[in-house]
Image (spheres, helix red, strand yellow):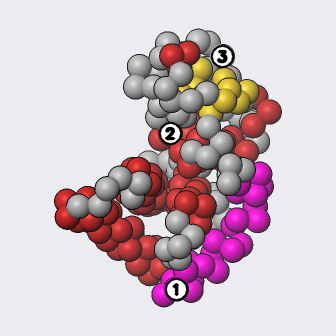
Amino acid sequence: MKLAHSPASPYVRKAVACAIARGIDQQVELWTVGTTDPALLPLNPLSKVPSLLTDDGMALYDSPVICEYLDSIGDAPKLFPAPGPARWKALQLQALGDGILDATQPRRREVALPQDDGRREYIALQQGKVARALDVLEAEADQLGALTTIGEITVACALGYLDFRYPHEPWRPGHPKLEAWYAKVSKLPAMARTEPFVK
């Protein structure tokens, strides 16, 4: 398998973390490519990473689809639970973690542009989404495990991205349970081996 990859992308980190958690990371070749590189277009018409080329030549995107595909390979315990309450919870957490990323990634571009009222309102709106998501995660932190589901992996990647790109907006104050959980899981291979290295 070949994974179109950018080392600073939290969505790529999520996919690679899933491969590590499933014990199949040695089967995934990382292809470092920029989203403006024309070479990416045959793999993904949206020109986004991650994109995965499977061994049988199928192109898959984006991270939820890639992670579910990776979860179908090998014999390790599944990150996507079987249908039932545990699955819905895992998918809900995945959506919450992806939502944090969706609210933070575009904001990096906005702060570099001239600040008018509309841009400031947009930034505040996205900050509000992240703040509310963190409060929900704090309330549920006692239920989070050791990166055994796609939801937990996604949330961990989202918190790591906040540390990576927004250290001036610390998320830990007011979230002690979530902080303690993240401190534990950030040492696990899926997180420790995928820490962004573009500083």
Q: Residue at x 51, y 16 (%)?
A: 38
Residue 156 visible: no
Q: Is residue 91 above or below residue 36?
A: below
Q: Alpha-carbon distance for marks 1 and 2?
A: 29 Å
Q: How many marks?
A: 3
Q: Is residue 33 above or below residue 82?
A: above
Residue that carries the numbered disc 3 in the rendered image: 55
In the rendered structure, does residue 177 fall within the stretch colored magenta?
Answer: yes
State the image coordinates of residue 54 (x, y, percent, origin top left).
61, 20
Residue type at mark 1: give it. Answer: Pro
Nearest the eye: 155 or 34: 34
Instruction: Report the disc number at residue 63.
Output: 2
Q: Residue at x 35, y 73 (%)?
A: 132
Locate residue 55: give its quadrant. top right
Q: Residues within 10 Å of mark 1 (few under 14, many from 20)?
A: few
Q: Nearer the viewer, mark 2 or mark 3?
A: 2
User: Reading the chain from its start, which is encountered first: label 2 or label 3?
Assistant: 3
Q: Which residues are magenta?
A: 172-195
Q: Say what secondary structure mark 1 lies in.
A: loop
Q: Residue at x 64, y 80 (%)?
A: 180
Q: Is residue 22 above or below residue 66?
A: below
